[in-house]
Amino acid sequence: MAKTNFKAGNMLYPLPAVLVSVADKQGNTNILTIAWAGTVCTNPPMVSISVRPSRFSHHMLMESREFVINLTTKELVFATDYCGVKSGREVDKWKELHLTPLVSQEVAAPSIAESPVNIECKVERVEHLGSHDLFLASVVAVRVDNRYMDQNGSFHLEKAQPIVYSHGEYYDLGAKLGKFGYSIQKNRGRKTKKTQ
């Protein structure tokens, strides 16, 4: 199988494209799009986001050391792109996009009401890595939209139509291909035809 050599770089795709909401100590707020976000630890729950120091929201993150990760959907794809290309120095993104700030439970930064999942975070430490600063944070609260809860208390994010980001483009998710552990799950109750 032939392959082409690329220069070393970030080729880990697809990625979740998330809307991160922030606030400073004076109560000013902003929303920025982050594609470099990820799970770091389960217990205690921790996440990370990477942000360029030149971004308008960077000083808010450094000052407040709090943020909210708001998961994105097909319905929010326009807002997701807009918040990644327009600066909060120039425009009030809440107003322009008709997004609703929702008072968070544990942090001063507002959550986005239209997002199906709001993950409230407090920064534990900042790593200055080069082009980006990595904000390593503890998850202190999570809220999910009741529209995607079933009668058994299970949350169904797939019904919100989440999106991903890959090589500069946004995609919705396709059909489910399996679930965790399906490759080793025994097929019980399946009838087999007898060969004659």
Image (cartoon, rainbow, N blue to C red):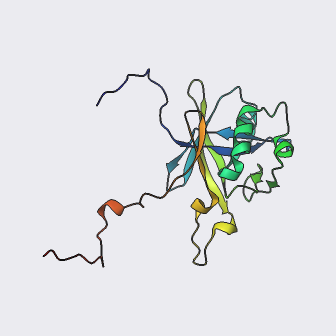
Q: Is residue 115 above or below residue 17?
A: below
On-image quarter of the C terminus: bottom left
On the image, the x and y values in percent for residue 161 come to: 62, 56
Farthest left residue in view: 196
Visible in this render: residue 25? no
Depth check, front residue: 184 or 193: 193
Residue drawn at (49%, 57%) of the image: 175
Q: Is residue 176 above or below residue 133?
A: below
Visible in this render: residue 128? yes
Residue 151 falls in image quadrant: bottom right
Residue 135 falls in image quadrant: top right
Q: Exactly how many numbered labels are in the figure?
A: 0
Depth check, front residue: 193 or 93: 193
On-image quarter of the N terminus: top left
**Left or right of residue 36, residue 105 in this image:** right
On the image, the x and y values in percent for residue 192 come to: 23, 75
**Left or right of residue 170, residue 31 in this image:** right
Farthest front residue in view: 196
On the image, the x and y values in percent for residue 42 come to: 49, 55
Residue drawn at (69%, 64%) of the image: 145
Residue drawn at (87%, 45%) of the image: 95
Depth check, front residue: 152 or 65: 152
On the image, the x and y values in percent for residue 69 come to: 66, 49
Residue drawn at (65%, 59%) of the image: 141
